[in-house]
């Protein structure tokens, strides 16, 4: 019975020690999400207006789709990093 207070004191002393501070790091973005937009298609020389309009429309759509995806990804990542930095 005399050893019980000593045992409790040893347990409490072990809990009172300070932990080694670990500074967590916000994860880096996945490299597959950090790709650049594809190159726009070159228009072939032609006299047909329909082919020119078709090529321009495809390029316009590709550009705006890629731009929107990149903007959304960057905004999401920056928001998450800001929240992470505020919490820690």
Image: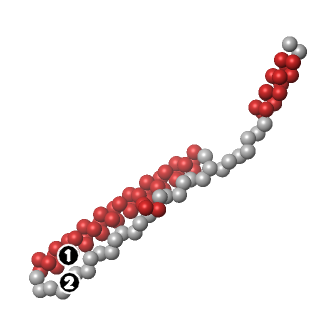
- Residue 47's spot in the image, x, y percent? 12, 86
Q: Report the residue that reaches farthest toward the right.
A: 2
Q: Residue at x 25, y 67 (%)?
A: 61
The answer to which of 56 and 39 lies nearer the viewer is 39
The answer to which of 20 and 73 lies nearer the viewer is 20
Q: Is residue 78 left or right of residue 49?
A: right
Give me the C-alpha separation between circle 2 and circle 1. 9 Å
* Dot 1: element: helix
In which image quadrant can residue 27 be found? Answer: bottom right
- Residue 54's spot in the image, x, y percent? 16, 74
Q: Residue at x 87, y 18 (%)?
A: 3
Residue density around tag 1, few if under 14, some if 14–19, many if 20 or more, within 10 Å: some
- Residue 30's spot in the image, x, y percent? 47, 58
Q: Is residue 7 left or right of residue 22?
A: right
Residue at mark 2:
44
Q: Mark 2 vs mark 1: which is more N-terminal?
A: 2
Residue density around tag 2, few if under 14, some if 14–19, many if 20 or more, within 10 Å: few
């Amino acid at each position: 019975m005399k050893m019980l207070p000593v045992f409790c004191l040893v347990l409490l002393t072990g809990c009172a020690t300070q932990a080694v501070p670990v500074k967590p790091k916000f994860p880096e973005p996945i490299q597959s999400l950090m790709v650049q937009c594809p190159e726009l298609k070159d228009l072939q020389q032609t006299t047909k207006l329909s082919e020119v309009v078709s090529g321009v429309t495809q390029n316009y759509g590709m550009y705006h789709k890629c731009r929107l995806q990149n903007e959304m990804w960057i905004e999401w990542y920056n928001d998450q990093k800001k929240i992470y930095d505020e919490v820690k």
